Image (cartoon, rainbow, N blue to C red):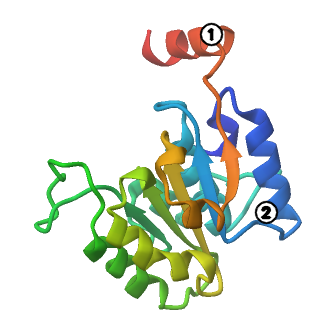
Amino acid sequence: MAAFRDIIGHSRQMDVLKRAVRDNRLSHSLLFSGPEGVGKATAAIALARLLNCAEPVDGDSCGGCRECASMDAGTHPNLIRVVPVDKKGEPAPDGLIRIEQVRDVQAAVRYRVERGKKVVVIDGADRLMPAAANAFLKTLEEPPPDTVIILVSSRAPELLPTILSRCHRVNFRPIPADLLGPFLEAERG
């Protein structure tokens, strides 16, 4: 997983999120929108990591505490990730997020957190089935205390207008080639 400092090409967005966390002004419902593959889901997990880090450093997660390690392993109880799956929990062939998944999220966010914040990341939010999207509206509008919901979408205009109106939008753009090239060379050869 990544910390804000590891995300390239979106320094403005990361600065806005860090300031919102620092000033305790982070919206409870966010929409990370932009082209496919630019790091929206990575940024969502980095935000979840910061919100639960035991020892934040300079407005970012430390990367060394037990909370960060648990986030990196995908086992932290305060992180709920939703991706399209079928009724058996297998990747959904139709790529849709079903109402059962939304109900599971609603049940999970009812439980209080010991520390940090419960963060729900719905990756591919534009693939919420209409019944699932409608069922999620109340939770999105008034999530339980200490809960942040992050919708991630590369096709935000396909979301219901009622969902769009309940989220603070953070727009991501394509990563500039002058940043992406050196990063790919260093990371992938």
Instruction: Name the residue rendered at 76%, 66% in the picture.
Output: 26
- Residue at the extreme left: 88
Query: On the image, which quarter does residue 150 sit in?
Result: bottom right
Crowding at mark 2 (Cα within 10 Å: few <14, some 14-19, many 20+): some
Instruction: Name the residue rendered at 80%, 37% in the picture.
Output: 12
Q: Is residue 174 above or below residue 96?
A: above
Q: What element does badge 1 sit on? A: helix
- Residue at the extreme front: 161
Give the x, y percent position of residue 139: 53, 81
Residue 166 seen in the current view: yes
Instruction: Name the residue rendered at 54%, 91% in the picture.
Output: 112
Left or right of 7: which side holds 128?
left
Residue at which label 2 appears: 21
Q: Amino acid at mark 1?
A: Ala
Looking at the image, is mark 2 or mark 1 nearer the viewer?
A: 1
Residue at which label 1 appears: 177
Which of pointers 2 and 1 lies earlier in the amino acid sequence?
A: 2
> Which quarter of the image is occupied by the C terminus?
top left
**Residue 130: mark in rendering:** none
Q: Is residue 106 above or below residue 67?
A: below
Q: Amino acid at mark 2?
A: Val
Instruction: Name the residue rendered at 38%, 65% in the picture.
Output: 75
Q: Is residue 111 above or below residue 160?
A: below
Left or right of 77: which side holds 178?
right
Crowding at mark 1 (Cα within 10 Å: few <14, some 14-19, many 20+): few
Q: Nearer the viewer, residue 87 or 42?
A: 87
- Residue at the extreme right: 23
Q: How many numbered marks appear? A: 2
Q: What element does badge 2 sit on? A: helix
Give the x, y percent position of residue 138: 53, 82
